[in-house]
Every structure is written in structure tokens, then in C-alpha cells.
Image: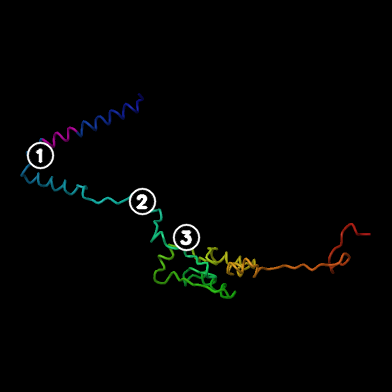
Amino acid sequence: MSLLDRLGKKTFDAIDRAARAAETLRNRVEPMLEGTALGERLRERDRLHDVSDVPTPPSNVSPFVPQPTGDATRPPLGKPELAAQLFGRGTDPWTARTRQLLRDRGIELEWNDLEAEGGVQLEAQVVTETKHPSGPWVYLRGEFVGGFNAVHELDRLGQLEVMTLPPEERRDGRGRTRIVVAKRGGDEQAEGERGNPDDRK
């Protein structure tokens, strides 16, 4: 047995002996204090320190872990029947820019202002559902795409209108961008175009 183990055993033995001695002393002194003012004060002190009637929490959950809010069986926020849905605060400049971009492209939009009544619960649900901590939140045909930067990038690539089309129109190929390259004859060369290096004389 190591020195540390021996010291630990001796310490715990001493604590046990002290607890037994205190219990023995209490059993001898309590009958003598029965009915005295000192005995009453000691009993009052014991009642104040009694924690048996303190309710215990149902579970020991960390306050730093976000708790689920509301009903877990709520339907998802994204609605495939709508071209676009925007969740955000009316006073947020990025939300305003996103709304303006969607309006400029003529996209039908469902606007959900999180500063309105019930907005706190709605924001908690959208954050939980999207895992995106800050707004705005944009859904296109029921699919979360991101915030302003994501919508702006889709617009820049010419995909914003395509993503807002109903699924049957997307399957038909309507709204797709086609790039057509004009064909030229074999010897034709556009002005300013360099020829094949092997053709040099």
C-alpha cells in the first residue's frame, strides 16, 4: 500500500471516529437540553438547515444547452407550395435587402416578421430547424437555402427563378438557361481570333 493510500485510509478512519463520537455526544446531551431555551434554539437551527423538504428538479440539465421549445411534433416551416418564404426582423437591414431582391425578381413571397406577436417562438423553431443562428432565413419551395448571401448568389448564377418554379415545371425544363454557341464553317475565323499556331507560314 502506498503512502498516499495509507494517509487516505487514516483520514477516513479519523472522520468516521469523529462522526461516531459526535453522535454519541448528541445522544447524551439532547435529553439534558430538553425543555431548555438552549435546546429550543438548537432545534430551531436544525429546522432551518433541514433540506429534506426542498424540491429537487426533475432532471439535472445544463443551463448552457438549448432546451427544445414548444411541441416537437410541429410541422416543418418550409412549404413546398410557396415559391419563397422569408423569416426575419422588420428592422434588420439584411432582411430588408432580401425582401427587396425577391420583389425585384417578381417572386411571390410569404413574409414572416419575427418582431410581431409570437415571433420569439417562431424564431426558436426556425433556428432549431435550420441550424442557422441568425436571420434572415429564406425557404425556396419549402427548402431552406440560407440568408441574403445565399439568395444573392443564386440570383447571380441565374438559378433563383429556377428554384422558385413548381416541381413539375422544373422537371419539364422550363426556366432553364440555355447557352447556344453558333457553329462556323471550317475556314471561318472571327475577327480578333487567333489561328492555330501550326497554320503559320
N-terminal label among 3 and 2:
2
Q: Dot 1: what SS?
A: helix
N-terminal label among 2 and 1:
1
Q: Which mark is residue 30?
A: 1
Q: Quadrant of residue 178?
A: bottom right
Percent coordinates x, y for residue 201 in the rendering: 94, 59
Percent coordinates x, y for residue 128 in the rendering: 45, 59
Q: Nearer the viewer, mark 3 or mark 2?
A: 3
Magenta span = 20-27
Residue occupied by mark 3: 129
Establish if 6 lies above or below 195.
above
Q: Is residue 44 magenta?
A: no
Q: Main secondary structure of the magenta part?
A: helix
Q: Nearer the viewer, mark 2 or mark 1?
A: 2
Mark 2: amino acid: Val
Mark 1: amino acid: Glu
